[in-house]
Structures are given as structure tokens and as C-alpha cells.
Image (tube, rainbow, N blue to C red):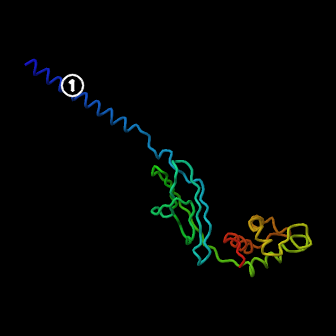
Amino acid sequence: QVNTMNKKAIQLFGIALLAIFTLNQCSESNDEPDPCTNGPSIEEIEATPSVEGKDNGEILIDATGGTSPYQFSVDGTNFQSDDSFSDLAPGDYTVTVKDANGCTATEMVTVAEIPEVFFANQIKPIIDANCQVSGCHGSNSNIPSFATYDDINDRANGIKFRTSNKTMPPGGPLSDDDIQLISHWVDQGAPNN
């Protein structure tokens, strides 16, 4: 009878050790950090408007953190390794960055729609009447000329910045409509159209 008791005690002791070992293993596996705690984040999204009727908007995504390489999506389903998307219609997009661990960061962005603006019959007349004048960007000035498309295109971003901030032309700011036309023209790539 003592022998049977010892066997049962040994069996119970073995079961207890197995239970302790199993609990210890489970608790160790639960102590591992979540790989997504330091997952990716979206640092910046640059959305270029789409010209009315052209579906030519663009989104450029800057991601940090997480584990590279990253995958990018503008619909949450189709991912690519390139961080830029082009030929986008105007509208709202769900931008998602997924890292090598499958961790994600998501933000909403809107690709705006802007009207098509023409250099020859909209922008050039504004420049000629307000900037390409004596004492400003005229040909007899030591300030860069705005006589040709190339002259204007080379400085398109600066023209947009200065007119939007109403620091150009020096004779007084352009009308809000003219400022918006210049801004849209630059946003659509300052085409020679």
C-alpha cells in the first residue's frame, strides 16, 4: 500500500511539474513585445491636384519607423513598393503604409480637382500686364525678365509663392482670381499650353 501511495505521489508531483512548466512557457510567450508597437508612421503625404477631366493627380508618401521594406497603398488592398501613385482621379484616398512585419499606418488624403489653366491666354496676359513692365520684370530692368515662357517657367514656383503671399507685383497684389489662376497653373506643372 505504501508503494501505491508513493507511485500516486510521484504521478501527482510529475503532473504538478508539467503544469508549472506549461504555465511558465505560456507566460514567456506572452511577454514578447508586440512588433507593431514601434510600427511605421506616415511622416508626410504630398497630394498633387488632378486637372479637371484628366485624372492626373498624384500622391507621394514619406514613411518612417517600423521595419523596412515598406509597401504602400491608396485603397487599403493593392500594395506596391513604390511610394508614389499617379494618374489619380480627384477624390478621397486611404493611404496605408505596411512594413516588413505587416504593421500598418493609415491616413486619409484628398486629391483635389483644379480647372485646366492655359499659359498663352490666361497666365501670360497676367504677367505681361502686371510684371513684365518697366521697373519690374521688363526687358530694360536688371531684374530677371518675364518675356518668354522659359523665363516664367524657370521661376514658376517663386511666382506662385510671391503672388500668393501678395508680395508681388510691387504695384499691389493681383486679384484673388488671378492669384488662383497662377497657383492652379503651377500646380498642374506649369505647362506651355
42 in relation to 50, above or below: above
Front residue of 29/106: it is: 29
The amino acid type found where label 1 is placed reads Phe
Q: Quadrant of the C terminus?
A: bottom right
Under circle 1, the secondary element is helix
Residue at the far bottom: name it: 121
Residue at the far top: name it: 2
Front residue of 166/121: it is: 121
For label 1, the residue is 13
Q: Where is residue 103 shown, x and y percent of the image? A: 47, 51
Tell me what residue is drawn at x 85 percent, y 68 percent.
144
Q: Mark 1, residues whose alpha carbon is within 10 Å: few (<14), some, or many (≥20)?
A: few
Residue at the far left: name it: 1
Tell me what residue is drawn at x 45 percent, y 62 percent.
77
193 in relation to 30, above or below: below
Q: How many marks?
A: 1
Q: Is residue 16 left or right of residue 53?
A: left
Quarter holding residue 133: bottom right
Front residue of 72/16: it is: 72
Tell me what residue is drawn at x 48 percent, y 53 percent.
104
Quarter holding residue 131: bottom right
Q: Is residue 46 left or right of residue 37?
A: right
Q: Where is residue 70 shown, x and y percent of the image? A: 52, 54
Q: Where is residue 19 shown, x and y percent of the image? A: 26, 31
Q: Where is residue 124 shown, x and y percent of the image? A: 78, 77
Q: Quadrant of the N terminus?
A: top left
Residue at the far right: name it: 140
